[in-house]
Amino acid sequence: MLNIIWAAFFILAGLTAVWQSITGNWEIWPELVNSLFASANNGFKIALNLTGILCFWLGCMKIAERSGLTGLLAKALYPLFYRIMPDIPKKSPAFGSMMMNIAANVLGLDNAATPMGLKAMEQLQQVNPHKDKASDAQILFMVINSSSVTLIPITILMYRYQMGSTNPAAVFIPILLATSVSTLTGFLATLLWQRINIFNRVVLAYLGGGILFVAAVAFGFAALDEAARTRVSYCISNLILFALVLGFIVSGLIKKIDVYETFIEGARDGFKIAMQIIPYLVAMLVAIGVFRTAGGLDYICSGIAWCFERLHINTDFVAALPTALMKPLSGSGARAMMLDTFSTYGVDSFAGFTASIIQGSTETTFYVLAVYFGAVKISKTGAALPLALLSDFAGIGAAIVLAYLFY
């Protein structure tokens, strides 16, 4: 699947560039070549910047593993994961790593979530009988990551505040609902694809508990005034992040572990993983970069607008579509599109409001796919990409509908 998608980006970029040449834009060719080099350089820089984060968090993870914290987390999730990932051994440390990754994503702690997720993927790979092919457990974990529920979208709130929004936290509840739709869609679709019984009492209990928790958070934040929402969102994620690091270290000291040497051991693993993902990251970002530079996204937006106009459906949301189309491809690209929408239409305009919700509704699917599977050298990703894109479309569709309801 990745082989076809990767080649398709280049072929479509080439065809689009030919069309632009026919219509008189001959400058597209040097722009396309410059995009090749710029995207390759950007991919290397992203991996390089990720190296320090990986070293730090995998060092912390090693302390948590040795002190038994990940084992405790694994026990909390085991009743659920045993049923949705039946091929994973009961005492696998992957359960604890997945729990920490999901918790970090829920709290919007991207810098912590990625290293924990890579560690979990590596641990899942250890029990994968086909090393070049993604297991069902890895596919499910990837889909959960690419559609991750984010309770506290702190980055989006801060961008809205910096761009002068009169109510930065107005998008909080719509984002929470949109990302919940995305995650639920991806989770259930993957279970159905893998023929897992979703009506099992334990699975339904965890799902019901998760839905109630999201509802409670939404209700709690709805009860706060605008200033309090922004302040709480900004402070709580950072507080939890530092408390997490401190908890790892204190737990290690209680267990009489040499926390410094243990940290260094885990950090070495982080460096190795960072080096492994560079080729995969560069390959994907270059393909996405040329497709974007050739104008592929612009043509898609124009086509969608044309279709909805013929159906006599309101097209106010089309101004936010560049963010929606870029989101599965590039996190930085989607962020740039969102900020451009803020600048062009206004941060508190309908387009700016919609782009904010879309930005928080899903993860960057192709980036997650390249990094997570690249880290364990998996080339056959099975149904991971279609299932992840399904959750993306569900989240983006929900974001647009919610924008009309809440604006």
Image (spheres, rainbow, N blue to C red):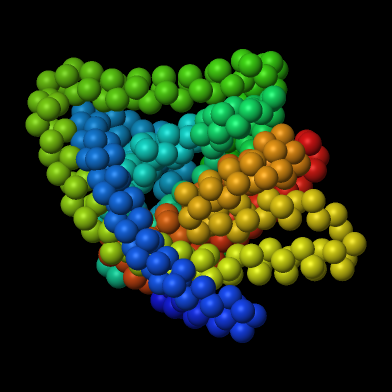
Give the residue drawn at x 18%, y 17%.
254
Give the residue drawn at x 50%, y 53%.
333
Find residue 346 and report its image quarter.
top right
Quadrant where the N terminus sits is bottom left
Give the residue drawn at x 86%, y 58%.
313
Residue 390, placed above or below residue 123: below
Residue 21, placed above or below residue 146: below
Quadrant where the C terminus sits is top right
Residue 302 pos. (x, y %): 72, 66
Residue 149 pos. (x, y %): 55, 41
* Residue 75 is at least partly visible in this image: no
**135 left or right of 245 in image:** right
Residue 383 pos. (x, y %): 49, 68
Residue 64 pos. (x, y %): 25, 31
* Residue 259 is at least partly visible in this image: yes
Find residue 307 and report its image quarter.
bottom right
Give the residue drawn at x 85%, y 54%.
314
- Front-lying residue, 195 or 38: 38
Find residue 54 and report its image quarter.
top left
